[in-house]
Image (spheres, grey):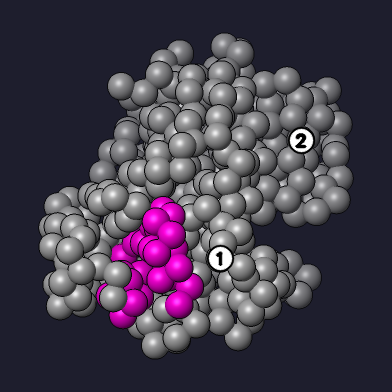
Amino acid sequence: MASKRVLLLCGDFMEDYEAMVPFQALQTFGVAVDAVCPGKKAGDVCRTAVHVLSGAQTYTETVGHNFALNATFDEVDAASYDGLLLPGGRAPEYLAHIPGVVELVTKFVSLGKQIASICHGQLILAAAAGVVKGRKCTAFPAVKPVLVAAGAHWVEPDTMAATVVDGNLITAATYDGHPELIRHFVKALGGTINGSDRRILFICGDYMEDYEVKVPFQSLQALGCHVDAVCPSKKAGDTCPTAIHDFEGDQTYSEKPGHPFSLTASFDDVDPSSYDALVIPGGRAPEYLALNESVIALVKHFFETKKPVASICHGQQILSAAGVLKGRKCTAYPAVKLNVVLSGATWLEPDPISRCFTDGNLVTGAAWPGHPEFISQLIALLGIQVSF
């Protein structure tokens, strides 16, 4: 059983990343996370919003994944948790006006629990009388007037990754600040991270799955790893569009546009020998990346040198094309089973869809619901430990 327990306070059209990244990252690190929403119960879903700064006077919004709750709001006892997480997005605008929400947040504060809030989540903090008064905090810049009116000492975010710590209160401007926010939160919960001086490479492509790149990328950054993301024919600072794949009752997953993902290095400059592990996200990108000989050569290097490789969902299409699965045991998104079996691997059924498997230096997962297990198996191969 997890030694630490955290509550994630959700609402419809909370920001997609700002709910799922901390939710899955903390579970990866051994923290139990309960996600609740006023008026909803365990098993219900919240719609999410994809917010992007794209040059307009404010962010754009499109519809994100459906986020499944795993606990019931009316059954929450603040005393049984070690911390509280408040995602941003549009949900805080109305959550801040629900008396039960304000009462719950005030209870967490009065008990001295650790609080982490991001982007527009600070609207809820401002609504709880006295919570931010005299406290240093930041937020998405549009939230400044409310925080100042509530008596906070406003800290202007010099970048959208800015994070501010004031005692048991951790605030960040946007999801760009997740790695630092999560790292501070883990430390505040009494956690220590060891063995994180690792260099990890992600092979990216246009329309890779949104969660399947961002969640492991920022989770590994939160541990203190150096993480680079590259894409053939692109350089550092370029972006890849992503795809939101979700399970909405159809015969296969639905697809919606996701966040643009910024690359951190140039594909042509990559020296694979300088990295300790490789991660391959799923989505639609692997279909065509599997045809790229430079990608295949890169993948083969990691197998020849027996370095950890973690591949999820459709990412195994690249592994199949590289001829590295023969004699291996692995899983993938069920539609990729044919690729895996024809490449000479032993198919492991992903039942449930969150199942992940390690075979030697290879970690495979079926889909993004399995991220906590997927990432934890990778960091185990890397010798990284989080303890409380």
Residue 20 location, x and y as percent?
46, 49
Counting every numbered tag in the picture gives 2
Residue 345 location, x and y as percent?
17, 66
Q: Nearer the viewer, residue 225 or 253?
A: 225
Residue 344 location, x and y as percent?
15, 72
Secondary structure at badge 2 equals strand
Residue 368 location, x and y as percent?
35, 57
Q: Is residue 25 left or right of residue 51?
A: left
Residue 211 visible to an observer of this rendering:
no
In this view, the residue farthest toward the front is: 304
Q: Which residue is disc 1 drawn over?
A: 272
As measured in the structure, the alpha-carbon distance from the residue carrying label 1 to the one carrying label 2 is: 35 Å
Q: Quadrant of residue 28?
A: top left
Q: Which residue is disc 2 drawn over?
A: 164
Q: Mark 2: which amino acid?
A: Val
Instruction: Check disc 1: other Cα within 10 Å, few if <14, some if 14-19, many if 20+.
Output: some
Identity of the residue drawn at 60% across and 59% down: 274
Q: Is residue 308 a member of the stretch shown in magenta?
A: yes
Q: Nearer the viewer, residue 187 or 358?
A: 358
Q: Mark 1 or mark 2, which is nearer to you?
A: 1
Instruction: Check disc 2: other Cα within 10 Å, few if <14, some if 14-19, many if 20+.
Output: many
Q: Is residue 140 left or right of residue 373?
A: right
Q: Mark 1: which amino acid?
A: Pro
The quadrant of the image that shows the N terminus is top left
In the displayed structure, 18 sits above or below 148; it is below
Q: Is residue 359 a member of the stretch shown in magenta?
A: no
Identity of the residue drawn at 56% across and 82% down: 232
Q: State the extent of the magenta-drawn residues as a range.
A: 297-322
